[in-house]
Image (cartoon, helix red, strand yellow):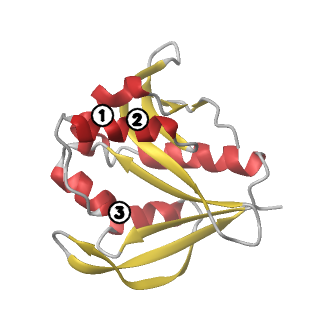
Amino acid sequence: MQLITLTTPRLVLCPFSIQDADDLFPMLSDRDTCYDDGGYEPFSRDEKYTKLMETFAAQEGRYVIHLANSDKTPGKAIGMIHLMDNDRAVPSYEIGYVLNKDYRCRGYASEAVNAVIDFCFANGIEMITASAGSFNQISQQMLLKLGFEQEGISHKAEKHPIHGIVDSINFYLMKKE
C-alpha cells in the first residue's frame, strides 16, 4: 500500500524522509525511549545513525509524526509509526509507534495511530495488530481506548535492559463492516 501524507487537527504524518533525521535524533538517542521501543541501545550521531536513517527511508510503511504548522504543513518531527506486513489470512498490518518523550501523554500517539488505522481500513486492510511490553501500561491503555482487543500474551517475549525478561501483550483491531 502506497503511503500518503495524512493530516489530523494537530499532526501531519508523512512517509519517512532522511530530512527528519535531525528532529528524530533526540528521541533515538534517549535511553528510556530506545529501551521501551525495542530494547535497543540509544544512538549517537555517527555512521550507525546515518545508516539507520537510510534504512528507514528505504522502508515502505514508515511514517514520521510531525506537529502541524498553522498552515497544516509538517512542523517538528516528534515520532514514528511503522506498518509491517502481518502473516494473517486477511489483509493486515502490525503497527508499531514511538514518540519523543517530551510529547507523550498529550494524545498525539492515539491521534496519529487512529489516522493510520483509518487510512488502512479505507484501503483494503481488514485487521491491524499491535503489541506492548507487559511493563508498558500506557501503551496498552491507549490501544484499548482505540478499540483494540487483547488477543493474547507472548510469554517471555523479550529481554528488556531495565525490566528483565518481559511478556508481550498482543492486541488486534478488526475493520467494522
Q: Position of residue 44 (x, y in %)?
A: 16, 40
Nearer the observer, disc 2 or disc 3? 2
Q: Position of residue 135 (x, y in %)?
A: 29, 73
Task: For the residues labelled 1 and 2, say whether their Cβ atoms are less than 8 Å apart.
Answer: yes
Q: Earlier in the sequence, mark 3 or mark 1?
A: 1
Classify residue 71 as left or right of residue 25: right
Nearer the observer, disc 3 or disc 1? 1
For the residue pair 55 and 106, the one nearer the viewer reads as: 55
Q: Residue at x 64, y 32 (%)?
A: 4
Q: CA distance from mark 2 to mark 3?
A: 30 Å
Label 1 SS: helix
Marks counted in the figure total 3
Vertical order, 33 against 63 (above or below): below
Label 2 SS: helix
Q: Position of residue 73 (x, y in %)?
A: 50, 17
Q: In the drawing, what numbered circle is on residue 50?
A: 1
- Residue with the mark numbered 3: 138
- Residue with the mark numbered 2: 54
Q: Residue at x 70, y 44 (%)?
A: 1
Q: Residue at x 26, y 43 (%)?
A: 28
| Amino acid under disc 3 | Ile
Question: Label 2 neighbourhood size at 10 Å, few (<14), some (14-19), many (20+)?
Answer: some
Q: Quadrant of residue 80?
A: top left
Classify residue 59 as left or right of residue 52: right
| Amino acid under disc 2 | Glu
Question: Label 3 neighbourhood size at 10 Å, few (<14), some (14-19), many (20+)?
Answer: few
Q: Residue at x 64, y 66 (%)?
A: 173
In this rendering, does residue 109 appear at all?
A: yes
